[in-house]
């Protein structure tokens, strides 16, 4: 069986994003389409994540807000990789500013591999809007439209 090699490994993700454990929520980037500004990233839920100890004891479930944050970090990784590709020096600053149409479809538990997919929609100044979907075993577990403020927008 052939396994797809990631575009960016964990160390490169750490170079791209300002986040660090325990709040770095993606392990690797599988692909980025710089023409359409779409990205696919992955997080392996090991069971050792600190937030699982209290959510919930004896029945650990990844909190929904962490799934949305994972989508946002995926989108930010794409933006910062695009800046890097264009040789633009920017401050690696990104913060969620809004979430719309958020839906949680199925619990995510230890042993699951979360596949995050995010797509750039538009920007206005430093504010950027995205659509995102999180999947486990091909099934949607969470989806959202969200916005963030970046040090600079990805296009324009």
Image: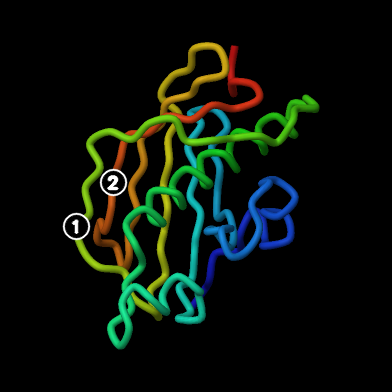
Residue at 55%, 55% (x, y): give it. Answer: 30
Q: In the rendered view, tell whether residue 134 sits above or below residue 85.
A: below
The quadrant holding residue 34 is top right
Residue 145 got which mark?
Answer: none
Q: At numbered mark 2, what does the secondary structure look like: helix, strand or loop?
A: strand
Circle 1 is placed at which residue position? 105
Q: Could you tell which of marks 1 and 2 lies nearer the N-terminus?
A: 1
Q: State if disc 2 and disc 1 touch (CB < 8 Å).
A: yes
Foreground pick, 74 / 38 = 74
- Residue 75 in the image: state x and y as whole percent: 51, 40
Q: Give neighbour class at mark 1: few <14, some 14-19, many 20+ (Cα, 10 Å).
A: some
Residue 143 got which mark?
Answer: 2
- Residue 39 in the image: state x and y as whole percent: 50, 43
Q: Is residue 14 left or right of residue 42?
A: right
Foreground pick, 85 / 49 = 49
Residue at 57%, 39% (x, y): give it. Answer: 76
């Amino acid at each position: 069986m052939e396994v797809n090699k990631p575009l960016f490994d964990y160390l490169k993700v750490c170079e791209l994003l300002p986040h660090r454990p325990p709040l770095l929520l993606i392990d690797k980037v599988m692909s980025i389409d710089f023409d359409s500004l779409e990205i696919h990233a992955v997080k392996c839920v090991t069971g050792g994540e600190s937030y699982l100890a209290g959510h919930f004891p004896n029945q650990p479930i990844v909190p929904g807000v962490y799934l949305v944050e994972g989508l946002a970090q995926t989108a930010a990784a794409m933006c910062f990789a695009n800046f890097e590709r264009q040789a633009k020096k920017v401050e690696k600053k990104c913060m969620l500013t809004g979430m719309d149409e958020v839906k949680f479809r199925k619990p995510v538990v230890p042993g699951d591999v979360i596949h995050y997919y995010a797509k750039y929609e538009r920007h206005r100044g430093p504010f950027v809007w995205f659509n995102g979907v999180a999947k486990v075993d091909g099934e949607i577990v969470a989806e959202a439209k969200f916005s963030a403020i970046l040090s600079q927008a990805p296009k324009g």
